Image: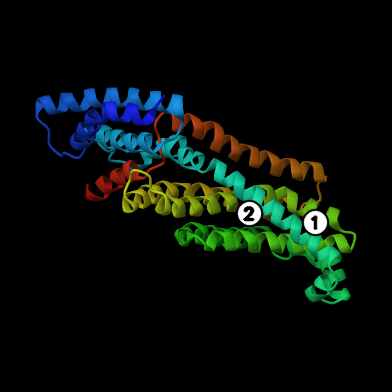
Amino acid sequence: MDIDAYAAAHRDEWDELTRLGAKRRFSGPEADALIEGYQSGATHLSAMRTSAGSSVQADRLSVALSRARLRFTGASNNVLRQLPTFFGAQLPAALYRIRWLSLAVTAATVLIGVFFAWWALETPGVLPAFGTEEFRRRYAEEDFVDYYSEYASSSFAGLVWTNNAWIAVQCIAFGILGVYVPYLIIANAQSLGFAAAVMAEQGELDTFFLYIAPHGQLELYAIFLAAAAGLKIFWSWVAPGARTRGAALAQEGRALMTAAVGVTIALLLSGIVEGYITRLDWPWAIKIGIGTLVLAVVLGYQWIVGGRAHRAGQTGDLDEFEAGARQLVAG
């Protein structure tokens, strides 16, 4: 399908749908036109999603459809009733939009971390700069493991969640700057690489992976999601497509603030695993299996549930949810 030609052929219909979606009061013929325009627009959006996937034209039509739907269904007067839609469609759709970027950030972190670990092990003077021989031995044999049992489980889980959530918030809030997210990615990968190098030097590399794997799979991926969201916001400003930069930034910002909710929940889950599971004297296969299962659930939510919601026309935009909240406050 030629998306540009398809959009040009239906532009008048979509513009009329946008105009009607912005109205507050309707005559009888206008209400009928709104419903007919919504039905035909939904068919057009489904055809574009199926044939070409995500596109600027499809995203703009999706926003117009969302606003039109609010006009003839009305916003719920109870925000709690909108939570199933939020968690079942809007949130996974927002996460789905950054799926490839999140994988790119994952790959970049792995490559950078491996490079720093190799460089630290192969370059004389790098590891001594990390600390004395005794300091590195104590870090590898005692401190690294003791860190996970230093605090009570609940306190430790809360501490880890707060720290990681703060990093995630920085990724999204300062993503528009363009340079801050790459800086955090490199700094995080460098830290992991140097820690792995010290553990490997002392013959404790297996301990490093055994203690990181239960919670680290989801924890790191949640940070990667936040980094991807920040990069997406930056790119919407650099390359807005047919939209103005302000409109592109506003639309992506609303959708990716939805993603921030998902990142926060994922970090909470990883914090619970780190605070309660990692320290337990269970077989490592069970602990790592729990971490892998939790990550698999999040990935399935992002890729499978999110893909289904995306193809149905959801963009993750907060407009509908905010409209319901405003009506609740007003009422």
Q: In this image, 62 relative to 29: left or right? A: right
Residue 72 horizontal/vertical position (percent): 22, 31
Disc number at residue 208? Answer: 1
Q: In this image, 19 relative to 228: left or right? A: left
Q: Amino acid at mark 1?
A: Phe
Label 2: how many Cα within 10 Å (few below 14, some 14–19, many 20+): many
Q: Is residue 281 above or below residue 286?
A: below
Q: Amino acid at mark 2?
A: Gly
Do we see residue 296 in this rendering? yes
Disc number at residue 271? Answer: 2
Secondary structure state at the residue bearing disc 2: helix
- Furthest-right residue in this view: 203
Residue occupying image coordinates x 79% and y 52%: 209
Residue occupying image coordinates x 72% and y 57%: 113
Distance from disc 1 to disc 2, alpha carbons, whole Å, reads: 18 Å
Residue 55 horizontal/vertical position (percent): 41, 36
The one of 211 and 157 positioned closer to us in this rendering: 211
Earlier in the chain: of badge 1 and badge 2, it is 1
Q: In this image, 78 relative to 105: left or right? A: left
- Among the 4 quarters of the image, the one containing residue 299: top right
Position of the N terminus, as image quadrant, is top left
**Label 1 with label 2: CB-CB less than 8 Å:** no
The one of 232 and 313 positioned closer to us in this rendering: 232
- Among the 4 quarters of the image, the one containing residue 147: bottom right
For marks 1 and 2, give the one nearer the viewer. 1
Residue 165 horizontal/vertical position (percent): 55, 58
Secondary structure state at the residue bearing disc 1: helix
Q: Is residue 144 above or below residue 5?
A: below
